[in-house]
Image: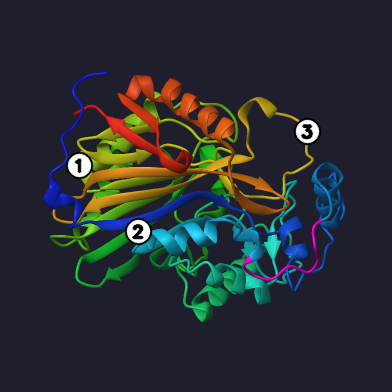
Amino acid sequence: MGQKRAINREEIFDTIALFMCGDVMTGRGIDQILPHPGAPRIYESFMKSALGYVRLAEEVNGPIPKPVDFAYIWGDAMDELTWRAPDLRIINLETAVTTSEDYEDKGINYRMHPENIACIREAGIDCSSLANNHILDWGYPGLIETLETLENAGVKSAGAGRNLDDAESPAVMYVEGKGRVILFSFGSVTSGVPSYWAAFGDKPGVNLLKDLSGKTVSRIKEKIRGLKQRGDVAVASIHWGGNWGYEVTHEEREFAHNLIADAGIDVIHGHSSHHVKGIEVYRDKLILYGCGDFLNDYEGIAGYEYYRADLGFMYFASIAPSTGKVVSLQMVPTQVKHFKVNRASKSDALWLRDTLNREGEKFGTRAELGVDNVLALQWENQ
C-alpha cells in the first residue's frame, strides 16, 4: 500500500452521513411473510408459488414466524441505523410494489403488495433507486402503482418514471444545516434491464444506460450541470453488470472515473451483483462497484456458494459537502437468515475483509477490521 490519505479533523464534523446498501428485494418470498401478502402465484419454471421460497428457507434454517411485523425483515439493521443516525438512507429497491397481474414473461418476477410498503417506511428509508431489472416485472401498470405507492409513503425515488423526463429526474434531498444530496439512478442493459424498458418521450420506463460511452457521460453531465449547486453532493446509483463474478470491467471503471472527473458525480453507488465487489476511491470520491444483496429470499437455493450471497454490508459513508470527497467509510457486515438482516459473525466479517482486500488491491484500497467487527476502508491518494 502507498501513502494513506490524511484526514482533516475539521472535515469529520462537517460531513453528510449516508447509509447505502445493496439490493433490497422485498418481493416474492419476503412479501409472503409480511402482514399483507400478495397473490403468491408466480410464473417461473422452477417455482409456481412465492410460498415455495418461504418453504425452502425454512427447510434450511427453521421456521419463520408468519406474519412478521414490518420491522422484522431489517433485523439487527434497525438498531444500527438508530445508533449511527445517518443523515440519509438510500437503497436499491428491486421489486415492483403492486397487485398488477400484467406480468412480464422474463423468467423471474418480483412484487410486493402495496400495503407492505410500511416495511420501507419502518426503516426510515429516504430514497429508493428504481432503475433495475425487476421494477417493470409486472408491466407498466405495476410500475405506475409502484411510483404512486412510494409517493404516498413519502419515500423519494429516482430512475423510473411516467415519462422520460420523470425517469431521468433525480431525487433531491435536503440535510438541514449541511446541504443537498442529489441522487441520479441509472440502469444498464448489462444488468439484465431489457432495452425496451427504457423511458422515451411520454412512454413510462427506466432511466436506461444503453452504453457506458463518453457520449453517455456527456449527456449525464448536462443533466447534472443544470441541477447541481455549490455544496451539493451528487450520487449516481447504478444497476450494472452481471449477478456473479468479481470482475470490474475496464469500461465500467472508465465510466465511473469519467462520471467523477467530467460529470460532477461525487459518490457512485453500484449494485446488481449478488455479492460484494471491490471498492475504489478516485480523486477522493467513493466508488462502490457492487454492494451485493442486502435482503433477499434466496435461503435454501443451491449454487454459487463460493460468493457468499448471504453476506453483505451496511455502508456508512461520510462525505464532505464542500468538496464531495469521502472522509470515511465504515462497513457493518451482515447476513441474511430467516428472511431478515442479521449482524454477521466474526469469521464471516473476516471473510468479507479478505474479499475486499483481494479485490481492492488493484484499486489501492484496503479494509481493516475494528471494534464489533466493523470494517473501515483505507485508501491511497489517487
Q: Is residue 243 visible to the viewer in this orientation of the structure?
A: yes
List the residue tagged with mark 2: 183
List the residue tagged with mark 3: 302
The three-letter code of the residue at mark 3 reads Ala
What is the spatial separation of the Cα atoms under label 1 and label 3, in whole angstroms? 43 Å
Side of 9 where 377 appears, left or right: right
What percent of the width, then of the height, locates residue 187? Answer: 48, 48
Which of discs 3 and 2 lies nearer the camera? The answer is 3
- Give the magenta range: 64-71
Q: Is residue 154 magenta?
A: no
Along the line of sight, which residue is nearer the eye, 61 or 134?
Answer: 61
| SS label for mark 1 | helix
Residue at the spot x=33%, y=64% of the render?
87
The crowd level at tag 3 (other Cα within 10 Å; few <14, some 14-19, many 20+) is few
Which of marks 2 and 3 precedes in the sequence? 2
Question: Where the N terminus falls, by quadrant?
Answer: top left
Which of marks 2 and 1 precedes in the sequence? 2
Q: Quadrant of residue 328?
A: top left
What percent of the width, then of the height, locates residue 320? Answer: 20, 52
Which of discs 1 and 3 lies nearer the camera? The answer is 3
